[in-house]
Every structure is written in structure tokens, then in C-alpha cells.
Amino acid sequence: MDAARTRRRLLDAAERLFAERGFEATSLRDVTSKAKANLAAVNYHFGSKDALVRAVFERRLGEVNRRRLALLNGTGRGRPAPEEILHAFIAPTFDLMKEAPHFIQLMGRFHSEPDSDMHEFVTSRCREVAQQFKRALTTALPRVPVGDLFWRMHFIMGALVHTWSCHKDIERISGGLCSMKDEDAITRKLIDFGAAGLRAPALAKRRRFANQDP
């Protein structure tokens, strides 16, 4: 039990420090000091700093992806609506915002810091989830090319990450009119925004219509 608590303290401390300072600027001694543990504990539980970083991501991504798939599988058989699929993708991240705000900050930093090894690790943990969402989307929107669906989900993910990490900006710019106090309302707004993008006609179809004589 003590070993499990020590491991959790190390992960919590690393998550917070990586979010606040970045990966390179945070040393293992910083982490052990914050966690009130010793260096031997890091070596015992993780083996290296790189493994600790991976464990921080694995802990949160594994849980959020499990929740995503549970919601996706709950949409039932047949053709799901894009809104149902997007709810399964987006809603768990807002749960994560409440449960682990430092990890949300860390994800914002992760997307802004080019680290090919870490990006490969994170995307490898999301490939199976991406494939299941691709299958759901191609069922829901069979006329949209698969490549377009990937791009559109990429754009939606960008909007989602920006909403996580920069929500204070819109609060300031709007003079308080827009805020993150009602996560359910923000989730619905993102779903409506994303569903409209997913349903948009493919570029080739728009060009075909534009070239037709009036």
C-alpha cells in the first residue's frame, strides 16, 4: 500500500511540475522533493525520467480513452449521429479538466513543445481509439472521404485543446460573457461546432457545384 501511495505521489508531483515548468526544466530531484520521496523511489517505480514522463501520460490517457470507448460503444448499433460520436470524444476530456487540471495544462504544453519521441508515444496510445472513432464516423457520414474525416477530427481536436488551455483568454476578451463555469454548455457548443464541420460537403463536391452554370 505504501509503495502504491509513493508511486501516486510521484506521478502527481511530476504531472504538476511538468505542466508548470516543462519536461526539460524539471529534474527528478524536483519531482522527488515535491513528492517527499527519494531518488531510489523513482528508479524503483519507473527506472528513468523518460519512463516517468510516459507513466504520467499513460495514467490519464488510458482512463480518458477507456471512458471515450465506453460512451462510443453505448451509442448502440446502426448509424450513430455525429453528435453522439463527438459527445463520446469530447465529454471525457471535460471530466478530466475537473479531475486533473494540471494534466490539461500539461497537454497544452505537450502540443506546443516539439518532442518527436513523446509525440510518437502519445499517438501510439491513441491509435486504437482513433480507429474505432474512424469506423463510427465512416458509418455516420459515408459520403465524406476518410481523409477529410481525419482532417476534420484533427481540427476539432485543435479546438478542444485550445479550449482546455486558453479558456482564460476568451473570458478576458469577452469581458466575462464567455466562461468555463458551465462545462456541459461548453461541451454542447463544441459538439455543435464540430458536428457542423463533420457534415460539411467534401471539397470536391463544393468545386463541382461551383463550376455548374447557374
Image: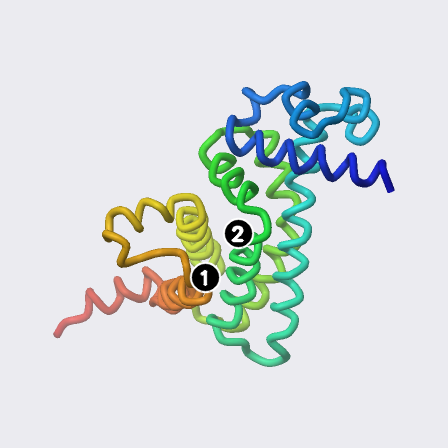
Q: Nearer the viewer, residue 145 or 212?
A: 145
For this view, does 22 lie left or right of residue 196?
A: right
Say few, some or many: other residues with alpha carbon within 10 Å of mark 2 (under 14 / 14 to 19 / 20 or more).
some
Disc 2 residue type (three-letter):
Met
**Coordinates of residue 113 in the picture (x, y in percent):** 48, 30
Q: Quick check: 62 above or below 54?
A: below
Q: Residue at x 24, y 53 (%)?
A: 174
Q: Secondary structure at mark 2?
A: helix
**Coordinates of residue 154 in the picture (x, y in percent):** 45, 51
Q: Residue at x 67, y 23 (%)?
A: 33
For this view, does 42 lie left or right of residue 105?
A: right
**Coordinates of residue 42 in the picture (x, y in percent):** 77, 26
Q: Quick check: 170 above or below 183?
A: above
Question: Residue under circle 1?
Answer: 183
Q: Give the alpha-carbon distance from disc 1 to disc 2, as whole Å.
A: 9 Å
Query: Can you say which quadrant of the picture contains the C terminus?
Result: bottom left
Say few, some or many: other residues with alpha carbon within 10 Å of mark 1 (under 14 / 14 to 19 / 20 or more).
some
Query: Can you say which quadrant of the picture contains the N terminus?
Result: top right
Contact, CB < 8 Å: mark 1 with mark 2? Answer: yes
**Coordinates of residue 40 in the picture (x, y in percent):** 81, 21
Between discs 1 and 2, the one toward the N terminus:
2
Question: Residue under circle 2?
Answer: 97
For this view, does 83 lie left or right of residue 76?
A: left
For this view, does 153 lie left or right of residue 203?
A: right
Disc 1 residue type (three-letter):
Glu
Q: Nearer the viewer, residue 186 or 177?
A: 177
Q: Residue at x 83, y 27 (%)?
A: 44
